[in-house]
Amino acid sequence: MNQNVISYDPSNGEILGEVQRATVAEIQEVVGNAKEAAKHWRKYSLEDRLGCIEKAYSAAEPSLNRLAELLSREMGKDIRRSTSEAQGSIWGGPYIAKSSLEALRSINAGGSTVEYVPLGVAAIISPWNYPLAMANNLIIPALMAGNSVIWKPSEETPLIAQAFFDIIHKGFPRDVVQIIHGDGEQGKILVESDINIIGFTGSQAAGKDIMARASSSLKRLVMELGGNDPMIVMKDANIQAAAHFAVASSFENAGQMCISTERIYVDESIAPEFEKYVVATAKQYKVGPWDMEGVNIGPIINSKQHSRIIEHIRDALEKNARLLLGSSDNPERYLKPTVLADMTPHMRIEQEETFGPVVCISCFADVEEAIVRANNSNYGLGAVVFGGVDAREVAQQLEAGMIGINQGVGGGGNVPWVGAKQSGFGFHGSPEGHRQFSQVRVISR
């Protein structure tokens, strides 16, 4: 095994750099250091923890442009999106910390006091598609709860993670925040080590493996495990608005987003018009590397994911899906904007998470049929309904943790980021989510 983790530019396959892969001994040392650091960090008040986070994240502000460009080079998204993610992460750290501060204060309950105390050491295992933002959502509440943190970023985006860590860790006491690099093997070693809670965002398969490895010592888990998000377009929907959202959601981050719209069910009475608007909108998207003018669909992260998307499209076409836009001749590393119609339940593209810039459409005669198909999945992260007076009633029948009515999911403010069924185990965001990184303790006297 190569002793280093090599980072590649997904737009051309060139090597960007490398970081050291952690050995078993190094991981054990990091965990030991984290345990010692946690003993001191837990004694900090909530206000003092907040102060450290504000200091650490303010130090990253001068490096915004450098971080954004590195994020684009390593992950592939265009510079506008990378800048937004980097800036949102720098600002978001203190924002999440402040909301965590209020959530973690002790509560008087009759003759008892409810306290939220540290668990110990938190392992944060983050994904490549939003390498700063998704890590932030787990690291900050773990720190505010008084835990020390060991961050293992994705092996696809180690450089941006290391660059961000190099800035922020200086704002904390020694070993309160540490980073290790590697692939699934290092993740497994970390999960099985003497830690107390695991925050993870990634695939169902990896999540199930983490759960199995954590079970022997009943480690706490907060996991978001992807989605295969449905969208229902009712006959009284604003067709143009629905079509615009369908394309924007399906193509965002080259479709490499856990809440991308993956399956669209549209009332047959408006399907031809909806398809027309979808194709017209999709044609406006431009594919290319992050630094090309006007690009809004970047490269696919690696060849394995590229092949998976191609296979899903091929399977659908072999099973009589209609190709409304796209080509079987896709360039290496990229995928042209693709629109498929006549999706059916026996196609892989309906049953599995595709994670690529593909709009998949199917018609329904009765909305009950659409609800059944939307719910026919072991995923349940997000769902969207576009429609009029009955849209809320339809939304309430969908099996998802987050549902948007005539808009995307997630809402505004400090609400939970939560998945239903096999899309989540625990959740983050909101006071209830922040508290999952702590031990609830009741003192009665």
Image (spheres, rainbow, N blue to C red):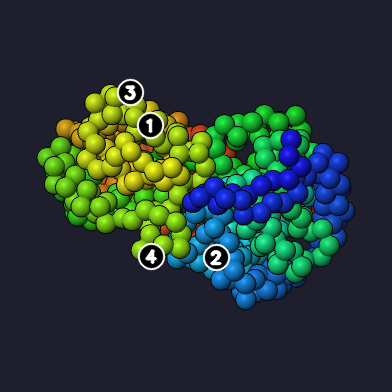
Q: Are marks 1 and 3 in contact (CB under 8 Å)?
A: no
What residue would you read off at disc 2? Answer: 68
Question: Quarter holding the N terminus?
Answer: top right
If you read the primary sequence from the N terminus, does the residue marked by circle 1 or circle 2 appear first?
Answer: 2
What residue would you read off at disc 4? Answer: 293
The residues tagged by marks 1 and 2 sit, at their Cα atoms, a distance apart of 32 Å
The residues tagged by marks 4 and 3 sit, at their Cα atoms, a distance apart of 39 Å
Q: Secondary structure at mark 4?
A: loop
Q: Residue at x 19, y 44 (%)?
A: 275
Q: Secondary structure at mark 1?
A: helix
In front of the other: label 1 or label 3?
Answer: 1
In the rendered structure, the answer to whether residue 413 lies left or right of residue 351 reads: right
Question: Quarter holding the C terminus?
Answer: bottom right
Using the image, determine if residue 347 lies above or below residue 177.
above
At label 2, the amino acid type is Ala
What residue would you read off at disc 1? Answer: 312
Q: Secondary structure at mark 3?
A: loop
In the picture, the disc for residue 346 is 3
